[in-house]
Amino acid sequence: MSHTLISLHLDVQRASRCTDLPSDDSIRNWVSAALTGRREVAELTVRIVDEDESRQLNSQYRGKDSPTNVLSFPAELPDDLDLPLLGDLVICAPVVAQETEEQHKALPAHWAHMVVHGTLHLLGYDHIEDSDAEVMEKLETGLLAGLGFADPYAPVDHSAPRTATD
C-alpha cells in the first residue's frame, strides 16, 4: 500500500517517561494508512503523554477522572477557513503498555491500533452507536491488516505466545 499521495505534516511530541515508544516513521506510516483514500492533505499532532496529563485531559474534556489510551481532539475551524488541520491525538504510553500486557498483544500492534483509531476519530468516525462501531472496527481491522497486524478485536488465546503481529 503506497502512502506517497498524502501530504502529511505530522508533529510528534514526546512528553512521557516511557522509553519503549514507536518511532516517528512508524507513527507517520500508521497515520498515513488511516488517511489514505480519505484525506490527501493533513496536518496533525500526536502527543505521547503519561497518566497525569491523560487523566487531566480526560477529566476536563470527557468528565472521566482516569487516564485513557487515546484522546482525539478534532480541529474546529470555521467553514470558510480551508486549512488541512485535522487535529490532535493524545496517547497515554503507560495505558497503552498496560493494555498490551492485559490483552496479550504485541506493543507495536497496539500502538498502531491506537494511532489508526485516533486518526479515524479525527476524520469523523465514532463508535457511540453499535452500527457506527461496526463500521469503524471493520475499517480499523482492514487498515491494520494492510499494515501487517492482526485483528485487534479478535478474541485472544491467552495461553499462546505473543508474536510481533498479534
Image (cartoon, rainbow, N blue to C red):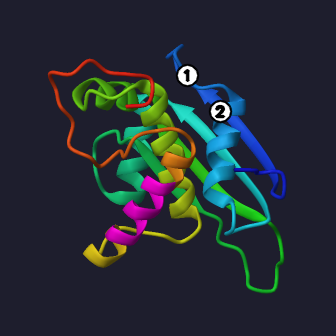
Neighbourhood count class around disc 1 (C-alpha, 10 Å): few under 14, some 14–19, many 20 upward: some
Please indicate whether residue 148 sits to the left or right of residue 152 in the image: right
Q: Is residue 140 magenta?
A: yes
Q: Position of residue 146 (x, y in %)?
A: 56, 48
In the picture, the quarter occupied by the C terminus is top left
In this rendered view, identify the residue nearer to me: 43 or 5: 5
Relative image position of residue 132 (x, y in whole percent): 36, 75
The residue that disc 2 covers is 26
Q: Given the image, on which type of amino acid does mark 1 rest?
A: Leu
Does residue 17 lie above or below 156 as drawn? Answer: above
Q: Earlier in the sequence, mark 2 or mark 1?
A: 1
Which residue is pictured at 65% across the width and 33% down the height? 26
Three-letter code for the amino acid on which mark 2 is drawn: Ser
Q: Is residue 105 left or right of residue 61?
A: left
Residue 64 location (% of width, % of height): 28, 51
Which label is found at residue 103?
none
Where disc 1 sits, the SS reads loop
Circle 2 — which element? Answer: helix
| Above or below: residue 15 compared with residue 137 | above
- Residue 117 magenta: no
Residue in the picture at 26% in, 27% down:
104
- How far apart, in angstroms, are the residues tagged by discs 2 and 1? 10 Å
Disc 2 vs disc 1: Cβ atoms closer than 8 Å? no
The mark found on residue 21 in the picture is: 1
- Determine whether 37 is above or below 29 in the image: below
